[in-house]
Amino acid sequence: MSKIDRVSLVFVSHSYHIVKGLQALMTEMQPDVKIAIAGGEPGGGIGTNALDIKKAIESVYTEKGVVILFDLGSALMNSEMAIELLDDASNVCIADAPILEGGYAAVVEAGFGSEVEEVKEAAQMVRGIPKIPTS
């Protein structure tokens, strides 16, 4: 199975350094999944940009689809705008998930060759999992 046979991921953050680190970590975890990033402003500032997100989606788009994970409020708004700017957004969705833990679950699921909705669901399933078990 090749990278074109898998769902791709896009990480969106207000910080370039955060998404660059996530991309490196997730690529190490699952090198067969295409991952793009969008984050920060030119000159190193904090922010997100719908056009940058659109370019990121297009750079990794496959027929299997793309799942977007984001960090904070306006990253969601700009991701939604980016999707609206696409010619065909039928296989592009946003996961309501923590960007790190959700990204990990999504990249593993995508690596299995799962469909876009399954990858999105895997990301969202981690929302309620406690990090520290209670006794």
Image (spheres, rainbow, N blue to C red):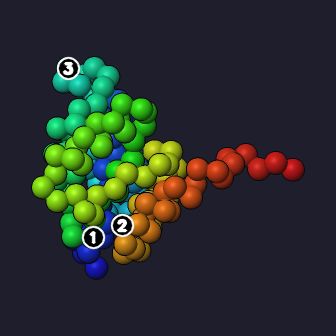
Please state, as top left, top right, bottom left or bottom right, where the N terminus lies in the image. bottom left
Q: Secondary structure at mark 3?
A: helix
Badge 3 crowding class, 10 Å Cα cut-off, few under 14, some 14 to 19, many 20 or more, is few
Depth check: give the residue in front, 110 or 66. Answer: 66
Residue at screen point 23% across, 25% down:
41
Numbered circles on residues, count: 3
Q: What residue sits 77% from the left and 50% below the top?
A: 133
Going by the numbered disc 3, the residue's amino acid type is Gly
Q: Nearer the viewer, residue 81 or 5?
A: 81
Disc 2: which residue: 116
Which three-letter amino acid code belongs to the residue tagged 2?
Val
Q: Residues within 10 Å of mark 2 (few under 14, many from 20)?
A: many
| Residue 43: quadrant of the picture | top left
Q: Position of residue 48 (x, y in %)?
A: 28, 31
Residue 71 picture location, percent across and down: 43, 37
Earlier sequence position, callout 3 versus callout 1: 3
Viewer can see residue 76: yes
Image coordinates of residue 88 in percent, x first then y, are 17, 59
Secondary element at image label 2: helix
Q: Is residue 95 left or right of residue 9?
A: right
Q: Which residue is mark 3?
A: 43
**Going by the image, does 79 lie left or right of 111?**
left
Q: Secondary structure at mark 1?
A: loop
Rounded to the nearest angstrom, the CA distance separating label 1 from label 2 is: 6 Å
Mark-to-mark CA distance, 3 and 2: 34 Å
Residue type (three-letter) at the residue carrying disc 1: Lys
- Marks 1 and 2 close (CB-CB < 8 Å): yes
What is the residue that sits farthest to the left in this orientation? 87
Residue 51 versus residue 31: which sits nearer the camera?
51
Front position among marks 3 and 1: 1
First-in-chain label (1 vs 2)? 1
Q: Which mark is residue 64?
A: 1
